Image (tube, rainbow, N blue to C red):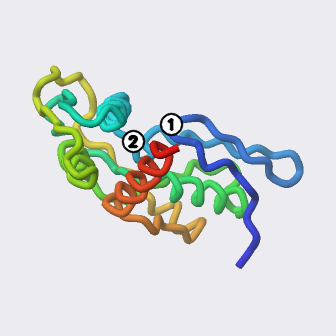
Amino acid sequence: MQELPRLDPALHGRRAQASLDKGQRLQVVTAAAFRLGARAHALNTAARAGGGPVKFTAGEQRRDFVYIDDVAEGILWAAARPGAAGEVLNLGTRVATSVREAVSLAVEISGRLVTAEFGALPSRAELSTLVANTVKTQRILGWVPSTSPAQGLHRFWEEFQRSSAK
């Protein structure tokens, strides 16, 4: 397998750049990368404090939750493939999961340290479903994510516990 360039995987929701040969730059936005937005911070804060309720909207929005390590890997693949230069490539699972489902799974994985109060916050005007179309990415890179949303949440929780123990 071809050696891939190194890129900091801490790209969660930020612009990232990887240096390519001949001074080219690859710029990617990972805004939808396996995150639940500001409410994820509230879940983490409540869990660190030993539990409690966290308020959410109804959670009916459907998103393509992709594990951040998979996003970092996809960016590395794009940086290493000459055919990817100048292309817009979507990284995702092509699976729509409701925010309610993702949060409920996170609560379950945490051992129910926190509770989710769905419908406690007003819904915002936003797209109801956002799912990555990865056909072009698969054709150009031959890349697909290897981590399911459930596996990603489990890994996230394990890392959260390790970092909380420090």
Q: Assign a secondary structure to mark 1.
A: loop
Q: On the picture, is 16 further left or further right than 104?
A: right
Give percent across and percent down for residue 9: 61, 50
Give percent across and percent down for residue 120: 12, 24
Give neighbour class at mark 2: few <14, some 14-19, many 20+ (Cα, 10 Å).
Answer: many
User: In the current view of this chain or complex, which residue is farthest to the right?
Assistant: 22
- The quadrant in which residue 121 appears is top left
Q: Which numbered tag is attached to residue 13?
A: 1
Q: On the picture, is 117 further left or further right than 135?
A: left
Name the residue rendered at 54%, 68% in the picture. Answer: 143
Give percent across and percent down for residue 17: 70, 42
Q: Which numbered tag is attached to residue 35?
A: 2
Q: On the picture, is 17 further left or further right than 30?
A: right
Residue nearest the viewer, comparing 21 with 157: 157
- Amino acid type indicated by mark 1: Gly
- Amino acid type indicated by mark 2: Arg
Q: Is residue 60 above or below residue 133?
A: above
Q: On the picture, is 19 further left or further right than 38?
A: right
Instruction: State how far apart marks 1 and 2 are (Cα).
Output: 8 Å
Name the residue rendered at 74%, 56% in the picture. Answer: 6
Name the residue rendered at 55%, 39% in the picture. Answer: 29
Q: Assign a secondary structure to mark 2.
A: loop
